[in-house]
Amino acid sequence: MPAYMNGKTGSWYVQCYYSDIDGNRKHKAKRGFTTRDEALTWEAEFLASADGSMSMPFEAFVKRYSADVRPRLKLNTWLTKEHIIRTKIVPFFGPKRMCDITPGDVVDWQNKMLGSYDDEGKPYSGTYLRTAERGRAPKRR
């Protein structure tokens, strides 16, 4: 996985080939990295995400998940789900690779949520905690 320096701008870029979900070979290039390592890290994360590898960082999975799920949900449902993911789940699992997340990590996250408080200093309601665990909005009655 080479990275290349743009002699005119002094920035780095990468280009790679991958197979899409239908098995079609695709080309991807990304420019404007300040360091070689930054370019190579982006390429590795992109390739892991593109092929659905469990070695992708959790944050990359969230991006892929969001792109897939968002168009199928009502706006308010998505906003609730996105808020929970962004504020409650990603801060805990963020940079971990999917394959490194263990059942113990999930239990630790759940226990952290049970011991957390909202902006007013009150414990989260049972409904909110169930919503966060399932990652979907509660049904209205």
Image (cartoon, rainbow, N blue to C red):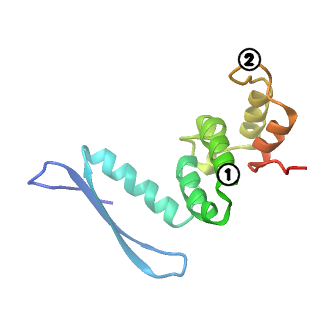
Percent x, y for residue 29?
31, 64
Image quadrant in which the N terminus is located: bottom left
Whether residue 128 can be seen here: yes
Q: Is residue 129 above or below residue 15?
A: above
Q: Is residue 90 left or right of residue 129?
A: left
Image coords of residue 8 (percent x, y): 8, 54
Query: Looking at the picture, does residue 83 appear above or below residue 71?
Result: above
Q: Residue at x 53, y 41 (%)?
A: 95
Disc 2, SS: loop
Residue found 75% across the figure and 50% down from its top: 136
Q: Is residue 124 left or right of residue 12?
A: right
Task: Tell me: 69 left or right of 63.
Answer: right
Name the residue rendered at 62%, 39% in the picture: 93
Residue that label 1 marks:
76
Q: Nearer the viewer, residue 84 or 50?
A: 84
Of the residues shown, which amino acid type is indicated by label 2?
Gly
Q: Residue furthest left?
A: 8
Percent position of residue 81, x then y: 68, 48
Q: Could you say which quadrant of the image residue 132 lies in?
A: top right
Question: Residue 124 — which label?
Answer: none
SS assignment at label 1: helix
Task: Count every numbered label the image shows and give the total.
Answer: 2
Q: Is residue 55 visible?
A: no
Q: Name the N-terminal-most of marks 2 and 1.
A: 1
* Residue occupied by mark 2: 121
Q: Quadrant of residue 27?
A: bottom left
Q: Residue furthest top?
A: 121
Binning the other alpha carbons within 10 Å of mark 2 as few (below 14), some (14 to 19) or many (20 upward) gives few
Badge 1: how crowded within 10 Å, few (<14), some, or many (20+)?
Answer: few
| Three-letter amino acid code at the position of disc 1 | Asn
